[in-house]
């Protein structure tokens, strides 16, 4: 039997279609099969902004399930409780730095805080956070750059899981301090392995020595319910 060009074209289209289906399945399986711990390990290895954007684009929709159900991620709740303890005024304007999908602000919202703002580098994470409907304002912003907020704009700043491996170093603290009102609070987690190594201790001590910030709380805690004590939970008050 003679096989026509048309026949071979059809075979080729079918093979391409099958290959695309397989590629999609294998991509979906990657997402499904990666354990929650693999997910954190991969997050801690991110090396640049491009990696960060690709990683959080891939995971934005599944982030909460992986972190909460898969790993018992408790850092957002614990740091929100710390800020609440020092800042009981529910109308206080609060900025969530590296807000991700909004887990930290969710806890503040649940106890009645009403003026919540957030920023994050990843537009995909910001999209998911926006669907919660709890933020007054959300911005796609790199916290390492000058922040698009007024001096003393916020009574409270909160950040969970952002000052960690492969993410953000201590460089933004001067700029963050600029946008806190005098007597306002900054509550954040900082991975303990980076505290000295990446210069968090040095940067925050310098801000204390210049009477800009005062540390009112700092304790080691867990980021995950069954995990090790791996992070500093800090609260600083802005002086002046
Ligand atoms: C581990 S997630 C934490 C998200 C959320 N705070 C939580 O605890 O679930 C870290 C977040 O930091 C954000 N991030 C990383 N680098 C950043 C940067 N330079 N500026 C702003 N956000 C950044 C990531 O996009 C990601 O959403």
Image (cartoon, grey):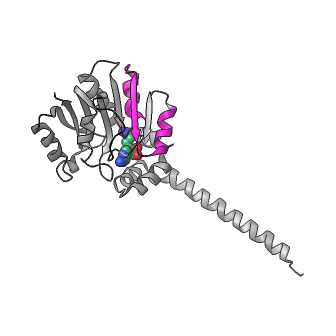
Q: Which residues are magenta?
A: 102-131
Q: Is residue 224 left or right of residue 3?
A: left
Q: Residue furthest left?
A: 209
**Would residue 57 be counted in the magenta stretch?**
no
Q: Picture coordinates of residue 214 (x, y %)?
A: 14, 32
Place residue 97 in its image quadrant.
top left
Q: Residue at left 39%, top 31%?
A: 117
Q: Quadrant of the C terminus?
A: top left
Q: Residue 219, percent across and down?
A: 18, 36
Outermost front residue: 150
Residue 128 is covered by the magenta coloring: yes
Give the position of the N terminus as an image quadrant: bottom right
Residue farthest to the right, as pictured = 1
Tell me what residue is drawn at x 84 percent, y 77 percent: 5
In this view, the residue in front, 39 or 148, is 148
Residue 206 seen by the camera: yes
């Amino acid at each position: 039997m003679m096989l026509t060009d048309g026949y071979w074209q059809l075979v080729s289209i079918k093979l391409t279609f099958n290959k695309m289906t397989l590629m999609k399945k294998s991509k979906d399986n990657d997402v499904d099969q990666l354990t929650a711990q693999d997910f954190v390990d991969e997050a801690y290895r991110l090396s640049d902004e491009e990696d960060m954007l690709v990683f959080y684009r891939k995971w934005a929709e599944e982030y909460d399930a992986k972190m909460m159900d898969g790993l018992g991620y408790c850092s957002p709740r614990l740091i929100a409780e710390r800020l609440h303890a020092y800042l009981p005024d529910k109308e206080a304007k609060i900025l969530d730095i590296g807000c991700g999908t909004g887990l930290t602000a969710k806890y503040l919202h649940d106890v009645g805080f009403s003026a919540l703002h957030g920023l994050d580098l990843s537009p995909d994470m910001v999209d998911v956070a926006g669907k919660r409907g709890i933020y007054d304002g959300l911005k796609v912003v790199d916290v390492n750059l000058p922040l698009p907020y007024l001096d003393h704009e916020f009574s409270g700043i909160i950040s969970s899981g952002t000052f960690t491996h492969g993410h953000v170093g201590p460089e933004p603290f001067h700029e963050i301090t600029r946008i806190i009102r005098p007597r306002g609070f900054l509550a954040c987690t900082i991975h303990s392995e980076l505290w000295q190594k990446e210069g968090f201790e040095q940067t925050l001590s310098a801000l204390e020595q210049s009477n800009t910030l005062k540390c009112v709380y700092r304790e080691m805690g867990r980021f995950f319910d069954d995990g090790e004590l791996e992070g500093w939970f800090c609260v600083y008050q802005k002086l002046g």
